[in-house]
Image: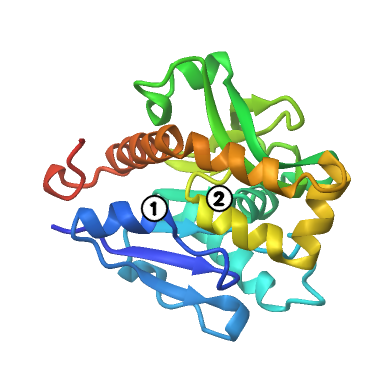
Amino acid sequence: MVPRVLVFQHATYCPLGTIGEHLATDGIAPTIIELNRGAEIPNLNDFDILIVLGGPMEAWEEKVHPWLVAEKAAIRRWVEKLDKPLLGICLGHQLLADALDGRVGRAKRGEAGLTVIDLAESGRSHPLYAGFGPRKHAINWHGSEVTDLPQEAVLLASSAECLIAAFAVGSSAIGVQYHVEATSTLVDEWSDLPAGAAHVERLHGAAATPSVRRAVAQAMPELWSNSRRLYDNFMDLAGAPRGCAQKK
């Protein structure tokens, strides 16, 4: 049976990216809910897997974005009551932590562009990272971060500027701060946005955008492979039928 995948999207420029490619390859058509455009959250019982994407808003901005209240309640119910697989990416990672009584705040520095992810001891033995070495490249793009894990959550990975780069909680809920779904095209788009350009300049200096873009583009073969492997591992963790998540 093909898994029914629900996606919470928060901005048109933060789509499924490579994860969407992998789902399509496996014959899975996700249901995408654009919460920032007023879409309502459907009956969670009708779905098997939840993917929560990134976005420009902050996890604590319920007054500016009232739909965050319902979204976090849905995430909490998904994990605590339904106990179904969830993959949270960047903002989705932060919302997962916030919904389960962890803490999210401004990052001491933040990240933009190509970074190195170091697996924690628990990450090296976790099924999400099966087949990975102790270090890998990833795309990061954030100014806030999870500062305290939810109770009983397990730290999986860190980066030089972000202690909690990935964590697991419950039977199959995963949060990754880095953009496993990002492509070089998306990074170009993010760095064209006024806020994105300012973020890059603050972290890397004036006129740094071309070098940030170039580093990402050069690393894309590895990043795409990392994305596919993590996707496959997550689908295995989610118990997706083997016909729907064949490894390459």
What residue is drawn where x is 52% and y is 58%?
52
Residue 230 % position (x, y)? 39, 36
Q: Which of 124 and 118 lies nearest the eye of the viewer?
A: 118
Residue 241 % position (x, y)? 16, 46
What residue is drawn where x is 51% and y is 36%?
218
Q: Mark 2 — residue?
A: 89
Q: Which of 22 and 193 lies nearest the eye of the viewer?
A: 193
Residue 160 % position (x, y)? 73, 25
Disc 2, disc 1: CB below 8 Å? yes
Q: Amino acid at mark 1?
A: Ile
Q: Which of 111 and 204 lies nearest the eye of the viewer?
A: 204
Helix, strand or loop status at disc 2: strand
What residue is drawn where x is 11% and y is 47%?
243
Rounded to the nearest angstrom, the CA distance separating label 2 from label 1 is: 11 Å
Is 84 placed above or below 128 here? Answer: below
Q: Is residue 107 visible?
A: no
What residue is drawn where x is 57% and y is 68%?
13
Q: Mark 1 — residue?
A: 19
